[in-house]
Amino acid sequence: MANPVTSILNPKGDYVFLYYVDKKQRLALDYIPVDRSQNVLSYAAQGTLEGDHVNNQSIAAVYFHGMPVVFGQLEIVKVSGEITTTKRVLAQLSPIVKAVANLESPDDTKLDERYNALAAINSTKQDYVWCYFLKNTAKEGAAPKMMLEEVSIFGNEVQIHHYSEIPDDLQPDSTTRLAALYIDQTHREVYYQRKGDDNSIYCYRIGNKSKPTPIADTGLAMKSTPLAVTRSVEGHVCLYYLSKPAGSDPIIQRVTRNKGTMEWAPSAGIMTGLSDKAVSETQLAVTQVIRNNKLENVVTFIHESEQKYRPARDDGQIE
């Protein structure tokens, strides 16, 4: 068959997943919304991006259309005569490589390999996904001036918001990592380290017009620490990061915030003995699970320099 195709209804029953092999012999996926008022369903074919996965990046997993999806960077190389251009764009990496922005204008979500922080979250009720990354708004040759960017995805629609309303002195540092948390449909939180000598982790709550605020007891966080955050069904928040007390190896720390409050409890160490080499290589990931009828967080990290991730259970103060 010259044009192989197959389709399946997504678990939520609101989209047809159309899989096909494109003209460059790559498996592609398009989402077709189920509109019961129409006899013929319409959609904009996106195809798949031609590019390479890269190691020097951050990736983030969410639920989208009822299935696990991973977002990250894709490196696109174009050759025109003797000129070769390379750029990175925000893309869906799994289960199928797929453009986030329109293929005709991928610069909307063009990323800089020097500032590769990324976080993503999804709505628990509707099919929304929000991706966060950093954009350098400084002129060529000037010192970096970072701005937090948000890409919201609903179905096949993509919107981009530049958080210029964040005061200049509270904008993210060029070396920061990002973590994000879904609160409700109109409120989300982004965690980062601001520019300057302050190593504290800041929380920016989107939707209530407040400034980013420092999280108490995170002042000893390592600069450019990886970040991971999770929230229980009851509304309790756990944020994980790395610190390095004087004369000590790096430590994975946790700060917690109980439901109905914006106050954070003092930080607690959950894992010691990380190597300095591992710190430069690791990303933190956290997933909440139930074990013996009790909540616990599984925190994944690189412990030594072998670049192999290992999970650690954190069952303290998890509610």
Image (tube, rainbow, N blue to C red):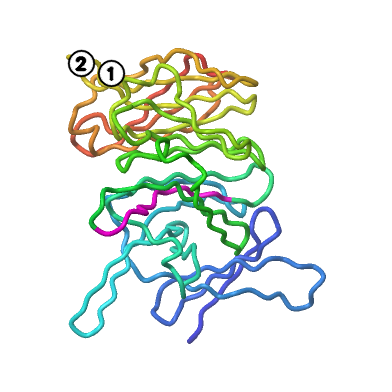
Between 8 and 99, the residue placed more toward the observer is 99
Q: Main secondary structure of the magenta part?
A: strand
Q: Are marks 2 and 1 in contact (CB under 8 Å)?
A: yes
Q: What stretch is highlighted in magenta?
A: 129-140
In the picture, the disc for residue 248 is 2
Q: Which residue is drawn at 29% across and 54% down?
A: 113
Rendered location of residue 289, percent (x, y): 53, 29
Residue 78 to residue 65: above or below:
below
Q: Quadrant of residue 249?
A: top left
Q: Which of 308 and 122 is in front in this view?
A: 122
314 or 57, which lies in front? 57
Q: Is residue 41 magenta?
A: no
Q: Is mark 1 on a helix, strand or loop?
A: loop
Q: In this view, does 160 lie to the left or right of 82?
A: right
In the rendered view, tell whether residue 181 sits above or below residue 131. Answer: above
Residue 66: x %, y % from top left? 61, 51
